[in-house]
Amino acid sequence: MEGATAEFTDPAQQRILPAQFDGVMASFLNDSLRFIASVFSLHVDDPPTPPTLVTIRGIRFPSDPSIEPHLLTITTTTHGVETGPDACWGHIPDLRPYWKTEQGWQWRDIETFRLENQPLASCNGLYILFYSFDLDNLPKNERFPEAIFGRTRCFAGDAFVFKIQGNEIGEDLGEDGWAAWQNVSKDILNLDIMKFSQSS
C-alpha cells in the first residue's frame, strides 16, 4: 500500500541491546562485588607487637604477720593476662611464686588508687593493687594500710602494689599500647598513708 511502511527488525540488531545490557550489568556487578569485598572482606592485620617485659619495683604486703611490708622487684609476665581483669595492660607483675598455685593466679583481681599531695612528690601517681581471692589455697590477709581505701581490706595471701604511668586510667599505656609500669619510690613506705594496724 502506497505510503505505508513496514518495519523489519534485523535479528542481529535485536541482539545489540541485550548484549549492551549484559555488558553494563557485568560491569555493575563487578564494581558492586569489589565494593562489598572492600567493606566486608576480612583483612588479616599484622599481629600486635607483644609487650616488652620489664623488671619493676613494687610493694609486698605479706599475709605472714612476722614479715613486714617491704619493697621488692618483680619481672612482668604475659601468662594468663589476656583472659584476666588486667588484659588491657598486656603484661603485669608475675606474682605466681607468691600465690603458689595456678588457681591463686587465675583468681586474682585489681584495684586502682591515686596518691596526691604527698610530702614526697615522687610518691604521687597512679597505683595498682594486685590481690588474690583464692582462700581455698592461701591464708587470709587483712594486713593492708586502711588509709588507702578508708577501710580494712581482706585478701587471700600476699597483696602487692605497683605504680603505673599517668594519673588515671587512660594515661597508663606506653607508645607500644601496653602498660607503662614505673618503679615505686624507695621512700614510699615512710608515708603516713602506708601505715597499717600492727594488730591486724
Image: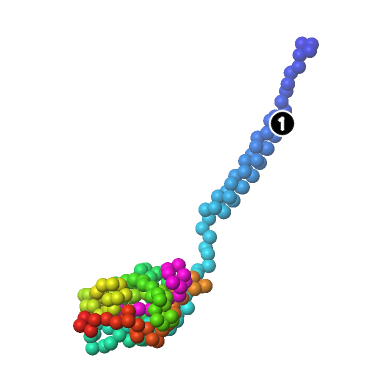
Residue 137 x %, y %: 23, 77
Identity of the residue drawn at 44% across and 72% down: 167
Residue 173 x %, y %: 47, 71
- Secondary structure of the residue carrying numbered label 1: helix
Colouring convention used in this rendered image of the protein: rainbow
Identity of the residue drawn at 24% across and 81% down: 197
Q: Is residue 171 magenta?
A: yes
What range is drawn magenta here? 159-173
The residue where tag 1 is placed is 13
Q: Is residue 54 magenta?
A: no
Q: Residue furthest bottom?
A: 66
- Does residue 120 sit above or below 126 in this rendering? below
Can I make out residue 78 in this image? no
Q: Residue furthest right?
A: 2
Identity of the residue drawn at 28% across and 87% down: 68
Quarter occupied by residue 24: top right
Which amino acid, by three-letter code, is at mark 1? Gln
Left/right placement of residue 44 relative to residue 160 reads right
Is disc 1 surrounded by few (<14), some (14 to 19) or many (20+) residues within 10 Å? few
Residue 140 x %, y %: 22, 78
Left/right placement of residue 157 relative to residue 1 reads left
Q: Nearer the viewer, residue 200 or 7?
A: 200
Quarter of the image for the N terminus: give it.
top right
- Does residue 9 sit above or below 65 in this rendering? above
Characterize the magenta stretch by its predominant secondary structure.
loop
Q: Nearer the viewer, residue 8 or 117?
A: 117
Left/right placement of residue 136 relative to residue 105 reads left
Q: Nearer the viewer, residue 45 or 57?
A: 57
Identity of the residue drawn at 27% across and 83% down: 62
